[in-house]
Image (tube, rainbow, N blue to C red):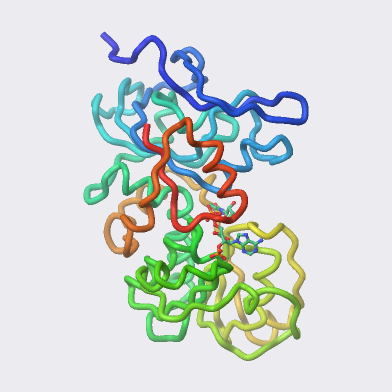
Amino acid sequence: MSSIPATFSAFVAQKDGDAVVREVRQISVDNLGEGDAVIRVTWSCINYKDGLATLANGKVARIDPIIPGVDMAGEIAESGDSGLAVGTEVIAHGYDLGVAHHGGYTEYARVPSQWLVPLPDGLTAKQAMAVGTAGFTAALSVHALERHGLRPGTGPVLVTGATGGVGSVAVGILADRGYEVTASTGKSDAEGFLKALGATEIIGRDETSGPGKPLERERWAGAVDCVGTSTLPYILRTLRYGGAVAASGNTSGIGLETTVLPFILRGVALLGIDSVAMPIEERRAVWQRIAADLRPRGLDEIGSREVRLAELPAALDAVLAGANTGRTLVRL
Ligand SMILES: NC(=O)c1ccc[n+]([C@@H]2O[C@H](COP(=O)([O-])OP(=O)(O)OC[C@H]3O[C@@H](n4cnc5c(N)ncnc54)[C@H](OP(=O)(O)O)[C@@H]3O)[C@@H](O)[C@H]2O)c1
């Protein structure tokens, strides 16, 4: 007999004219949409994209109403075709979750079993959500830079939006791998947090944004950027000869104004990072590495803030305002 209760709590965002109603509702498993496996969700987390999914003009949610949450961790309640026993701990993120399929802000979730990642040894469900999609993207960024040739000892690596989800995990991974990490932040009080994660230098956001010459002093052996418009052009014109930037985000906008000179005179590379559509076998392999050689330093400090479903509206507004330091976890 199934142990799934007749009703349980979920955080729902639903359009109402130009506004969006965001509230905790009691729902049943019949409200969860398609999928062969049911997960008892224990932890989720907050990403910038989750904030956008609750905005009327956020251009993220493709169903209405939606249970947002692009990440979840928990245990199998109904195994479907997964081949995993009831009670097995799993992670799910990416694909349509929290966008075109109900996401993780619910006590129970139904998902296609081909989206499931068994929780790797060495990570708890809570730690996996401290990593979440943002941290997974940071790991992919480091992986891409190293595939391009970046190695510790070849020069400073810049991380922008450094106190945010992608940024803070990137600082922690790079520092643990022996890189000299420079963290760029707009927060004047972030030095202690960033140094504890392993940043060797902190610079202000003003220094890494705004207009400049087509080429400037060569500074960075590599960079992890989740900011976009205001910052990516700066990185391209200050990368060292042959350096690369892993670009994953658009926190400051989607535009990109640059010249071709960094590419044709310094041979720099712009590496695009996508965590959403990645095939499941590759996703499972990257999670194994996050539990081992790509494990970020300071994971418990990065994920030290917790909210419950009822506290999500304020927490989602904070991520949209760029006000967060580290990651916010959602305890179910
Ligand atoms: N490609 C992918 O697969 C993928 C996956 C995950 C996330 N993303 C994208 O990556 C970006 C970051 O996501 P996140 O979850 O890390 O968000 P986040 O936690 O809000 O972090 C973003 C950080 O950027 C900085 N920032 C905020 N507003 C800014 C502005 N106007 N100009 C410059 N910097 C600003 C802030 O850090 P400081 O105060 O320290 O500067 C902020 O903490 C988002 O655009 C998200 O959609 C992409």
**Residue 5 or 76: which is nearer the viewer?**
5
The answer to whether one can see residue 102 in this image is yes
Name of the residue lying farthest toward the bottom: 217
Q: Give the vertical position of 259 relative to 27 (above or below).
A: below
**Residue 129: image location, x then y, percent:** 38, 45
User: In the figure, is residue 216 to the left or right of 81?
Assistant: right
Residue at image position (54%, 33%) is: 68
Q: Quadrant of the C terminus?
A: top left
User: In the figure, is residue 100 to the left or right of 72?
Assistant: right
**Residue 69: image location, x then y, percent:** 50, 36
Q: Quadrant of ligand 1?
A: bottom right
Residue at image position (38%, 80%) is: 152
Q: Give the vertical position of 207 relative to 17 (above or below).
A: below
**Residue 150: image location, x then y, percent:** 45, 77
Counting the numbered discs, the total is 0
User: In the figure, is residue 35 to the left or right of 68?
Assistant: left
The answer to whether one can see residue 92 in this image is no
Residue at image position (40%, 23%) is: 108
Q: Quadrant of the N terminus?
A: top left
**On the image, which quarter does residue 326 sit in?**
bottom left
**Residue 178 or 271: which is nearer the viewer?**
178
Residue at image position (70%, 87%) is: 215
**Residue 41: image location, x then y, percent:** 36, 30
**On the image, which quarter does residue 53 sit in?**
top right
**Residue 235 or 267: which is nearer the viewer?**
235
